[in-house]
Image (cartoon, rainbow, N blue to C red):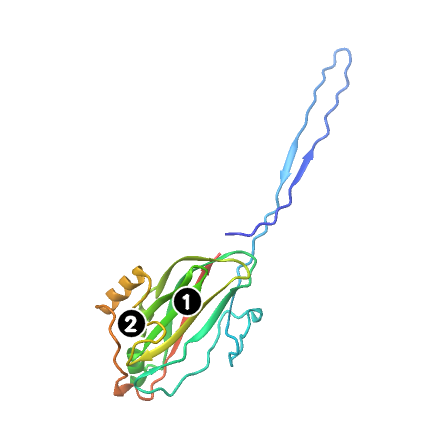
Amino acid sequence: MFGRKVALVVGVGAAGLALIGTGAGATFSTATQSHQTITAGTLGMSVWVPGNTNGCTAATDHCTQIKLADVGPVGSTFETPATHVYVTNTGNIPATFDAFQMSEADANTTADQALRNGMNVCIMSTDPSGTWVEGNGPLTVADALNPTVKENPVPVAPGQTVAYWVSFYAGQDSTLCGAKYSDGPHTIAAWTAAVGHGYATPASLPQAAQGGSVTPTLTFSFTG
């Protein structure tokens, strides 16, 4: 989709005039032209969290990525606070939000792997169409599915904001997302197939997870 600035020019050529006389012919002619200048718009999405200790606290900061405050140490049963993250269209053309992708990084130690394998993620979003549990279940499944959640395309006009909450937990159901994989039937089917069964309350972290550390990243995809 492109923004368009249009300048329309219409010109009329002067009529040609030939001498008219004995043995001479007369011919009249005319021509018209139209011109358009097409200017592509700019797609710009800014992510921000009010009061975030690592900056990017307003859409006017024009951040495309944001680092949230570290959490921990956590116990074997835990739930991190649900951080409310905003994404604002700071460009001059409409954008379409169409997918979430979860990824994670760690040092690949035994403890890191045990923590990663025992963690669960809750992703909830709100947009002009409503508030939804996007995906909720094992972090390993959210990481492996591509995309983690495929959206019905959500249009976001210039100046408009969408938002999401994300939290991580083990040993209990998410207080934010509840006891379900998603509010979307296609996502439920994808997560059920990946896990191998319907939603079940997750186990607590194993002994091997002590001292582990992981850094999850959630990416929004937009097109314009």
* Badge 2 element: loop
Q: Residues within 10 Å of mark 2 (few under 14, many from 20)?
A: some
Query: Residue 133 got which mark?
Result: none
Residue 28, percent from left and from top: 70, 22
Q: CA distance from mark 2 to mark 1?
A: 17 Å
Residue 191, percent from left and from top: 28, 66
Residue type at numbered disc 1? Ser
In-front residue for pair 168/31: 168
User: Disc 2 designates what residue?
Assistant: 179
In the image, 169: left or right of 29?
left
| Mark nearer the viewer, 2 or 1 | 2
In the image, 20: left or right of 53?
right
Mark closest to the chain's N terminus, 2 or 1:
1
Q: Residues within 10 Å of mark 1 (few under 14, many from 20)?
A: some
Residue under the point 29% across and 64% down: 188
Query: Residue 125 got which mark?
Result: 1
* Badge 1 element: strand
Residue 157, percent from left and from top: 52, 58
Residue type at numbered disc 2? Ala
Q: Residue furthest left?
A: 197
